[in-house]
Image (tube, rainbow, N blue to C red):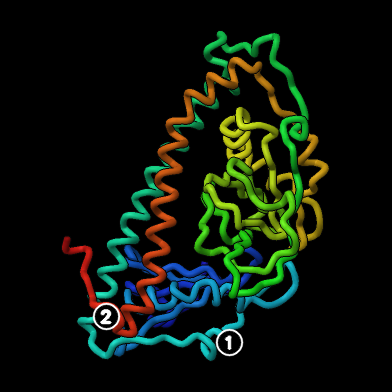
Amino acid sequence: MSKRSVPQEKFLQNGDILINSTGTGTAGRIAQLITVPFPTIVDGHMIVLRGNAKVTPRYLGYALKAQQSYILQLDEGSTGQTELNRDRLLAEIEVSYPVSLDKQRAIADTLTALDARITENAKINHHLEQMAQAIFKSWFVDFEPWDEVMPDDWLEVSLDVLCSLIVKGVTPKYDDNTNQLVINQKCIRNRSIDISLARRHRPKLINEKWLRFGDVLINSTGEGTLGRAAQFLLDLDNVVVDSHVTIVRPKNSELIPYLGLWCLSRESLFASMSSGSTGQTDLPRDRLKRLEVILPNGRILCEFSEAVMPLMQKQIAGIEESAHLAEIRDSLLPRLMSGELAIVNLAAK
């Protein structure tokens, strides 16, 4: 097989910043490479940004991540065919920076310390979810406590029997001058919700679509993101989802752990249920409602909640801490760049 020669500058370098440039739910996402272990290039669905001698790579990465919410708004095109406007990215995104490279490094070190803790929380929460999923599988898939046979008094019911609400979100009117947040598909990834990627909007009257603790969110449109699920475990009263996300609300509090883990374990099933043409795929709400779910008796549901709730409480603590740290990080950057705050290297403490 013949190989096409690739210019050396096309190979990724340590510190390069990658931005997804196509796809509903993914266009505008930013990541930075710390190290590149082997020769790597990217396909045409990514934009690579590489700083010059005026900025350190990590500083530039943080400066761009600070504008993540604005960059997410630069996608254009119809549903499923969205593309990040590269010209607008280069023309409209402005980066402020201290002339001193040492100051840039100190700022980056401070923010890196916060990110390291957020990353550690994510790892811990992933392990906690795996532990809860293992208990769920043992009880409700393999029936191990009951000699691998489903008890006779358990039922098989449709998903809507266990829910008080299965509905898609709102069509938002974006407005940065409110405290109301709308979660979109870009916020739901790796079975978790990145609230920092939510946008602000001006809602209509409060209704049933305002999220409640325990709601399960399922991405419901677009290839590559459809089917991703996460459970809303924050105690906030100012958050909704947009019309590309479906809310699955447990009927009562006893069902929150059980239904949350059931949904998270069925992301691949949700993705396989899509309908529509390429680029216009959708998760039909009626099909979602008809999915069969095992319903244990009330005593077993209570025992299961008691078994997994300590794991969920630890997850919630990690989620709340990470959300707080992300808020601090995002508020620090402009103040550090402007010199309003003195540089404190948290990594050295």
Where residue 308 appears, as percent x and y from the top left, is 48, 28
The residue labelled by disc 2 is 104
In depth, the one of 257 and 143 nearer the eye is 257
Residue 45 visible in the current orientation? no
| 295 left or right of 90 in image | right
Above or below 295: residue 70 = below
In this orientation, which residue lies closer to the viewer: 253 or 222?
253
Q: Nearer the viewer, mark 2 or mark 1?
A: 2
In-front residue for pair 175/34: 175
Q: Tell me residue 145's x, y (percent).
A: 52, 12
Residue shown at the point (80%, 48%) measured from the top left:
284
Task: Say if 164 sits above or below 50 in the image.
Answer: above
Q: Quadrant of the C terminus?
A: bottom left
Point out the tag, 2 or 1, that comes first from the N-terminus: 1
Q: Secondary structure at mark 2?
A: helix
Which residue carries the number 1 mark? Answer: 88
The residue that appears at 31% across and 58% down in the rendered structure is: 116
Residue type highlighted by circle 1: Arg
**Splitting the image into 4 quarters, where does residue 187 fall?**
bottom right
Q: Residue furthest left?
A: 348
The answer to whether residue 279 is left or right of residue 140 is right
Please state which amino acid type lies under the numbered disc 2.
Gln
Q: Secondary structure at mark 1?
A: helix
